[in-house]
């Protein structure tokens, strides 16, 4: 026994080395066999958290590029939405093989100038006639409507924001399908008003407002906002409704310009009928 | 003394993070993988007890392993390197031996001594590491090339780092 202890104390160094080394090699072999040793991989809480923080920091470096990619992807996906095609089958003559005909085209643009604090607010986008933008096109963001294109130059366009005293956009209450008109009374950039909601409807705060099919500029069903408050004025058959806009106009960055391919056709037809 | 301990702890933490967060992402053409963390073992003071060097090497290696999912690969290699540190130090000792106060730095022993000290140990470490990783000798020469190139890369980083980890006293 004494000899054993002597042996151990004399050779502790090499024994320590051998034991730790065999532990390491055991770990290597175990790792090869069961790809995930239970506690020594990066799903380990500490290592996982550090990696999470690290990637949280490095993710910011790619944020700009990532935003651009997402924006492009949104445009692509919107162009594929079934809603953007109107059924060609409804027309008496089938002109070509395709069942669907494109109704709306979405273009990507970046907001380069923006105002929210005036009575007549305008935005400037970095897309113009060279990119296919024309006047009277709708501008929307991923959150909701933004405005209508007023003037176009080669590479830029000026957009009349929803925050404009002459805004009049046909909208509808999603729940009832009742048509109404969106206006903006120049109070602040988060709220707008809706006219012509009949007082017999039982509206509640939080009801969703979307664009209506009566608009020849905006596609149907684009988010506008939610009802925040309403008031019934005595002797009037309409509500005074205030809504909260879903678009945050102070943070607009990437928007989509919507080209209604059948707008000319519709307006010409309507004009012809009115002349009757 | 306490100061020295704290400095080594900071160096340990810094090297582990530098290795796993930055150097592990560098893989030039599959041959160059720098493993700068061995610098910690190289720079332990001379009076560190041998068993402590071994234990520290094990802790260092296992820390790297935890982050890179390699079982005990780095632990085994840095243990092997730490085990051979004492014999190598004896082999290349200057004529009048080492002073207890001295530290194995380029400032105190000069470029030639430090180059052979770091060079031998880094090559030993990388040799053990890459062959342990491959676990067979079928691709002997391509593994050997990785050992040599990676050792050169690590050594370059070690020499650069010598100007950052400079001792305030010298």
Image (cartoon, coloured by chain):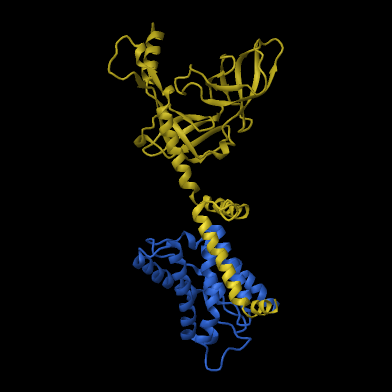
Residue A176 x/y as whole percent: 59, 14
Q: Is A193 rendered above or below residue B168?
A: above
The yellow chain is A
| Residue occupying image coordinates x 63% and y 69% | B10
Q: Quadrant of residue A81?
A: top left
- Given residues A176 and A100, the one toward you in this image is A100
Asked whether residue B105 appears in the rendered view, the answer is: no
Chain B colour in the picture: blue
Residue A62 x/y as whole percent: 48, 49
Q: Is A138 rendered above or below residue B61?
A: above
| Residue occupying image coordinates x 42% and y 69% | B150
Asked whether residue B44 appears in the rendered view, the answer is: yes
| Residue occupying image coordinates x 35% and y 63% | B138
Q: Which quadrant, please, contains the N terminus of chain A?
A: bottom right
Taking the image as shown, residue A274 lies to the left or right of residue B97, namely left
Residue B40 x/y as whole percent: 56, 72
| Residue occupying image coordinates x 39% and y 32% | A133
Taking the image as shown, residue A23 lies to the left or right of residue A239, namely left
Q: Is A20 rendered above or below residue A209?
A: below
Q: Quadrant of residue B108?
A: bottom right
Residue B149 x/y as whole percent: 39, 70
């Amino acid at each position: 026994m004494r000899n054993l202890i002597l042996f151990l104390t004399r050779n502790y160094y090499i024994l320590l080395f051998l034991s730790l080394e065999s532990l390491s090699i055991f770990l290597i072999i175990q790792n090869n066999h069961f790809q995930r040793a239970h506690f020594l991989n990066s799903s380990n809480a500490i290592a996982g958290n550090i990696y999470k923080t690290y990637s949280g920091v490095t993710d910011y470096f790619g944020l700009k590029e990532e935003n651009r990619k997402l924006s492009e992807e949104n445009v692509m996906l919107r162009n594929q939405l079934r809603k953007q095609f109107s059924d060609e089958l409804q027309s008496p003559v089938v002109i070509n093989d395709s069942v669907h005909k494109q109704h709306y085209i979405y273009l990507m643009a970046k907001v380069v100038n923006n105002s929210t604090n005036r009575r007549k607010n305008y935005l400037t986008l970095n897309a113009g006639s060279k990119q296919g933008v024309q006047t009277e096109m709708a501008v929307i963001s991923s959150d909701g409507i933004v405005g209508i294109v007023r003037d176009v130059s080669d590479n830029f366009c000026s957009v009349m924001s929803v925050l404009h005293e002459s805004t009049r956009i046909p909208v509808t209450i999603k729940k009832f399908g009742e048509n109404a008109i969106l206006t903006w009374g120049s109070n602040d950039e988060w709220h707008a008003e809706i006219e012509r909601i009949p007082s017999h409807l039982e509206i509640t705060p939080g009801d969703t407002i979307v664009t209506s099919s009566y608009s020849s500029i905006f596609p149907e069903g684009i988010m506008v906002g939610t009802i925040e408050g309403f008031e019934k004025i005595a002797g009037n058959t309409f509500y005074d409704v205030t809504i909260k806009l879903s678009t945050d106009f102070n943070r607009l960055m990437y928007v989509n310009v919507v080209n209604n391919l059948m707008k000319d056709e519709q307006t010409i037809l309507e004009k012809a009928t009115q002349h009757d | 003394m306490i100061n020295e301990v704290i400095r080594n702890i900071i160096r340990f933490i810094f090297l582990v993070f530098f290795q796993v967060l930055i150097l592990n992402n560098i893989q030039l053409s599959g041959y160059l993988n720098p493993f700068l963390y061995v610098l910690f073992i190289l720079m332990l003071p001379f009076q560190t007890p041998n068993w402590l060097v071994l234990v520290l090497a094990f802790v260092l290696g296992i820390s790297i392993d935890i982050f890179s999912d390699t079982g005990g690969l780095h632990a085994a290699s840095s243990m092997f390197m730490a085990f051979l540190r004492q014999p190598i130090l004896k082999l290349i000792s200057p004529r009048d031996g080492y002073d207890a106060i001295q530290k194995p730095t380029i400032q105190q022993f000069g470029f030639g001594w430090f180059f052979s000290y770091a060079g031998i140990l880094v090559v030993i470490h990388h040799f053990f590491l890459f062959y342990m990783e491959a676990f067979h000798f079928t691709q002997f020469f391509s593994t050997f090339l990785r050992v040599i190139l990676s050792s050169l890369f690590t050594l370059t980083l070690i020499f650069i780092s010598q100007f950052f980890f400079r001792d305030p006293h010298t």
